[in-house]
Amino acid sequence: MWKYILKRLLALIPVVAGVILIVYLILNIAPGDPARIALGDEVSAEVLHQWREEHGLNDPILIRYLRYLAGFFTGDFGNSFSPLQTPVFDEIMARFPYTIFLSVVAMVITFVLAFPLGILAAIKQNTWFDSISMFVSLIGVSMPIFWLGMLLLLWFSLGLGWFPSFGADSFAAVVLPAVSLGFSSMASMARTTRSSMLEVVRQDYIRTARAKGIGYGRVIRKHAIRNSLIPTLTIAGIQIGNLLTGTVIVEQVFAWPGIGSLMIQSILARDFPMVLGCMVLFTLIFAIINLIVDLAYAYVDPRIRAQYS
Amino acid sequence: MNVLSTGSQALGKTAQPKKRSQWADVWRRLKRNKMAIAGLIIFLLLCTAAITAPLFYNFDTDIVSINIPNRLQPPSAQNWFGTDEMGRDIFARVVWGSRMSLFIGITSAAFALIIGGFFGAIAGYFGKMSDSIIMRVMDIFQAIPGTLLAICIAAALGPSVINLIIALSVSFAPSFARVVRAPILTIREVEYIEAAKAIGAKPRTIIFNHVLPNCLAPIIVHTTLAIAIMILITSGLSFLGLGIQPPMPEWGSLLAGARGHIRDHSYMAFFPGAAIMLTILSLNLLGDGLRDALDPRLK
């Protein structure tokens, strides 16, 4: 098992190098001279040249990429193009806890609601509970998160005044962003849980268990839920990825000071080292989540576990 | 224009009489699914609204012209969805916005399908070296979350319709490559492909006449759902100011414009969002219905 994890972690290195290359190339086709954007139009060619020299922009792109890569693996993400020239790594680390906190709260909301909702809807198939919860989830997967965020803001912050409308100063401030972030993932996972549960309860081994005289509740708890978890886990991995991507938009709606809003602000300010750093960090988390999901398969399904050992 | 018609056209060319009855079968199964039909009808209505919008509105006088005395009017018989801070009719702008969203969503999905399908078909059909090279590159692209890659490309190229389409089709091509490759891998081993090879058919003929029609089902479903995701991302990017720029109406940028007035004029934030939701809902219903209808195991 540990060997497998180590192998997967080592396999991440070329992927990260490839991802950095792609993002590096993309950001380099951007029109506009970063030196001019940073310093304005009023400065002389010499100053511009000097600035480019300082930021290492006068070398060929391949050299710059390799230099960045070497720096990256030692925790040096370069410096921001902003006048303060903050190290990208420091800025990202300062913002990172906010994004993690927001995503974890959203994830908890997602999982705590999605599983019971999906399982109950499946058990009570074709009742009003099933219809209502599936209708709500259908709406949930179709709602753009920024619109949901705006509506929540309108009703619960401006209207009822229960929660602050922006910032991250109090614990209550996380509620609205987390709900808007988690709602569509919750809806999508509830739908998957329901359909995989419905598939499982039709299996022969469920009928066998019932025929042996085991009570309905016990069959559901011991036999059905665990088996229905596998498709749900696949979706869970995708949904956690979606949650992360969603932070980019949600943080902007609620002025949440995380990496998502940092990335958008950096894009608008054409601060490309910062954008690059955010992109790479998002990709890294994304990859690690996929690894965790693969390991979770092994935890849930002994057949998969057997393949590793 | 939409997925269904391109799918059936591609089939129309190659299909034998017996095949056509198979697609009639799919249609029969789809028709039985009320939700899917509802989705199809809503989507066709939205497409109709998008195509016929210029018959009812003049872009210069109705969509972008400023009419300050009439600004920020709540919904009324005159302005069904009210007016915005420039006095423009929100209903007209939402209808016009559907042209943007649907056009970008459908075109980007088509390009992503062409690019991804091309590489996926090569990887799946020829296998070996080409497969491992193409799929490793796709792996790296897929390691970046699609939405973020699209944001990144759109940001680098600058905001415009063409750049948005480039960003979306490049970001989602890898997922199409995967969807095209998987069924080809299994179909390639089947006897009728062997037979076609034996009578000396060229790879191109085999791929287009024999392999593709037989792996259309997952491709159609994936394309339908991809259009939905692309419309969502388009509106998201425009909301962030990286997509369609005002005064051109797009649902996301309409919502961004409504943010400043949300306290006193909340209707401005309601209708464009509802339009996005309706579109995504219809495509999700249609995609789910197609998935069931195209699965011959579910009779």
Image (tube, coloured by chain):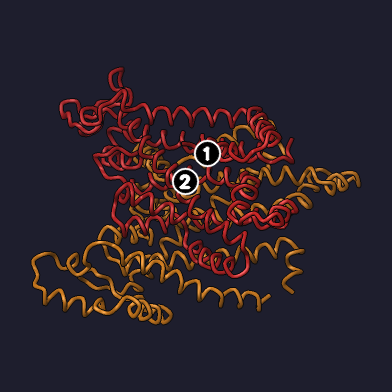
Q: Amino acid at mark 2?
A: Ala
From the image, tell me which residue sits under label 2: B110
What x and y, as percent, mark residue B63?
25, 31
* Residue B179 x, y percent position in the rendering: 58, 53
* As drawn, B91 above or below A7: above
Which residue is pictured at 47% across the width and 46% down the height?
Answer: B110
Would you say residue A238 is visible in this rendering? yes
Say whether marks 1 and 2 touch (CB < 8 Å).
yes
What chain is colored red? Answer: B
Whether residue A161 appears in this view of the structure is no
Say above or below: B143 vs B23: below
Drawn side of residue A284 relative to residue A305, left or right: left
What's the CA distance linking mark 1 and mark 2?
A: 10 Å
The residue located at (56%, 75%) in the rendering is A11
Residue farthest to the front, as pictured:
B199
* Callout 1 secondary element: helix
User: From the viewer's perspective, is the residue at label 1 or at label 2 nearer?
Assistant: 1
Identify the image quadrant of residue B136. Answer: bottom right
